[in-house]
Image (cartoon, rainbow, N blue to C red):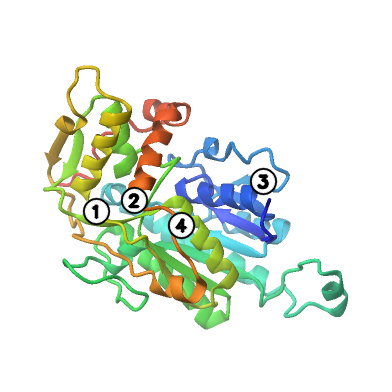
Amino acid sequence: MAETFRKRCIVTGGAGFIGSALARHLVRDTEATVLVVDKLTYAGNLESLKEVSGSPRYSFLQADICDQAAMDKAFEDFRPDTVFHLAAESHVDRSIDGPGEFIRTNVVGTATLLQSALAYWRTLPQTLNSQLSTLNCGATTQSSFRFQHISTDEVYGSLGAEGFFTEKTPYSPHSPYSASKAASDHLVRAWHDTYGLPTLITNCSNNYGPYHFPEKLIPLVILNALDGKQLPVYGAGANVRDWLHVEDHVAALRLVNEKGTPGETYNVGGHNERTNLEVVQTICRILDELRPRADGTTYESLITFVADRPGHDLRYAIDPAKLMDELGWKPKHTFDTGIRATVQWYLDNDWWWRPIREAKYAGQRLGVTK
C-alpha cells in the first residue's frame, strides 16, 4: 500500500541514476505526484523510469535547468510542494576533461533553479485560509514548501586513515566536480539565509545499485568483467569510499523532506568503507560464483592497475549520526547484501545496459591529463 506522502514533487535530473531511483520510489511507494525534469544528456535515460512511466502521477519535461524561462514555466504549470534538485554533471573524470560543463550545469543551473523557486515561493500564501484548512486539500504555503538540494561528500575533500565527515566539516574540494558542487551548496544556503527560501541540503557518500550509468566504478567493473575486458584500478587501489545503496539514499531524501529543518544540512552515509581494490575483488568473487568464465579463469585475473586519477582523494567516510538521531533514518542494506543484489541486477537486465555500452559508453578510460 502506498504511504501517505502526497506532495507534488519536481525531481530535477530524474532520468539519472539517483534521480530515477527517487522518482520510482515516490510514484511506486507513496502517493506523491512527480514531474521529472531532465535535459537527457548522455547519462539521462528514460528507460530507467519505465517502471512508473504509465502512472497518472508521473509526468516528464525535457528541459535544461539553465533555461530560466523553462524553469519558471515548470513551476507555474506544475505548482510543486517540493523540489528535489539532483540535476548535475557528476563524474570526476569527465570534470577533469571538461570542467566548463560542470560549472554551467552545477553552478549556473542551480542558481537559475533557485531563482525560479524563489519567484514561485513568493506567490504562495504564508498560511492556509480557513476554507482550505477545512477541506484539507494540501495546498502549498510558504512554510510548507521545500527546496531540497542533493549534494556529495566530495565537497569536504579528503580524510586520513581515521575520522569522519560531519555537517560541520570545512569544505575543501579538490576536483572541478567537487568544487562545482561545493559552489552549488553555498548558493542554496545563501538563498535560505538571504531570501528565506526553505531549503534543505543532503551530502551523500558513494551510491551504487540498479540503473547506474556504466562509467562509474561498480557498473564499469561488472560490465567490463562480463565482456572479458580489463578491470582498471587507479593507483594501488587503496583509495577508500563509503558505499551507500541508492534505495537507502532515496529513503533518506524523503525522510529529510518530511522531517528535516529548513536551513539544515544532513549527511547520508552507510558506514560501508571499502578500498577500491576490495570493491573490485568482491565483484569478481560474486561473478565467479554467479557467472563463471568459460575458460575457467577467475575474474580477478582481469584486474589491471593504471595511472592514478589526478587529485584523487584518499578517503571519504560519512558520519550520519545527525540523520539517524534526529530523524530516525537507518539503512536497510549492508554492502555485502547490496553489492550481491546489484551484480545480480546487471546479470538479469542487459536490456537496460547493453544499448548504453553499444551506443554511449563502452568502458574507456576518462579524465587522463598530461
Work out whether mark 3 precedes mark 4 in sequence or the reverse, and give the earlier one: 3
CB within 8 Å, label 1 to label 3: no
Q: Is residue 130 above or below residue 66?
A: below
Q: Quadrant of residue 32?
A: bottom right
Q: CA distance from mark 3 to mark 4?
A: 22 Å
Q: Is residue 29 above or below residue 120?
A: above
CB within 8 Å, label 2 to label 1: yes
For disc 2, the neighbor class at 10 Å (few under 14, some 14 to 19, many from 20) is many
Q: CA distance from mark 2 to mark 1?
A: 9 Å
Q: CA distance from mark 1 to mark 3?
A: 38 Å
Closer-to-camera residue (89/313):
313
| Residue 270 pos. (x, y %) | 36, 60
Disc number lying in front (1 or 3): 1
| Residue 91 pos. (x, y %) | 33, 49
Dot 2 falls on a residue whose secondary structure is: helix
On the image, numbered disc 4 is attached to which residue?
Answer: 249
At 48% from the left and 42% from the top, the residue drawn is: 44
